[in-house]
Amino acid sequence: MLAWVAGRDVPRDEGELNEALRRAMLLLAAGGDPHRELALDGSAVTTLASDLDRPERRDALMQGIDELVGLAGRLPRVRAALFDLAAAPDSAWRAYACGLLAAELGEED
């Protein structure tokens, strides 16, 4: 969730995002229940992350994480989670993609 919030300013093309989300949803459906728990290393999340991956998008995500660290001064667990994301950019990017996919699944309900 933190990566998804941190990614609020990640530049994205809505057409590209919609296509990538459709592919990810198909992968979820092919694997069984499309509403099962998402995994950062699951095929739907990793494919979505790969489809959307661009250096400028990753930079925007990392900047968003840095901004949230500044806002989380009195929330030590949140700060620690943000530091973990900042220390692992690949995991942070997959977490952002997972948040996008979770939001898409939530809109369908």
Image (cartoon, rainbow, N blue to C red):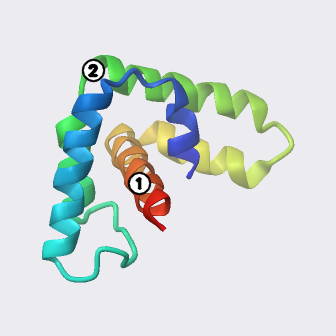
Q: CA distance from mark 1 to mark 2?
A: 23 Å
Residue behind mark 1: 104
Q: Secondary structure at mark 1?
A: helix
**Residue at the spot of label 2:** 55
Between discs 1 and 2, the one toward the N terminus: 2
State the image coordinates of residue 61 (x, y, percent, origin top left).
Answer: 46, 29
Determine the image quadrant of residue 32. Answer: bottom left
- Residue nearest the observer in this picture, 24 or 79: 24
Q: Residue furthest bottom?
A: 32
Disc count in the image?
Answer: 2
Report the residue at 52% width, 47% height from top.
Answer: 84
Q: Where is residue 31? Give x, y as percent.
A: 16, 77
Count residues near mark 1 (Cα–Cα under 10 Å), then give few for <14, some for 14-19, many for 20+.
Answer: some
State the residue in front, 87 or 98.
98
Residue shown at 21% from the left, 52% from the top: 22
Q: Is residue 77 left or right of residue 48?
A: right
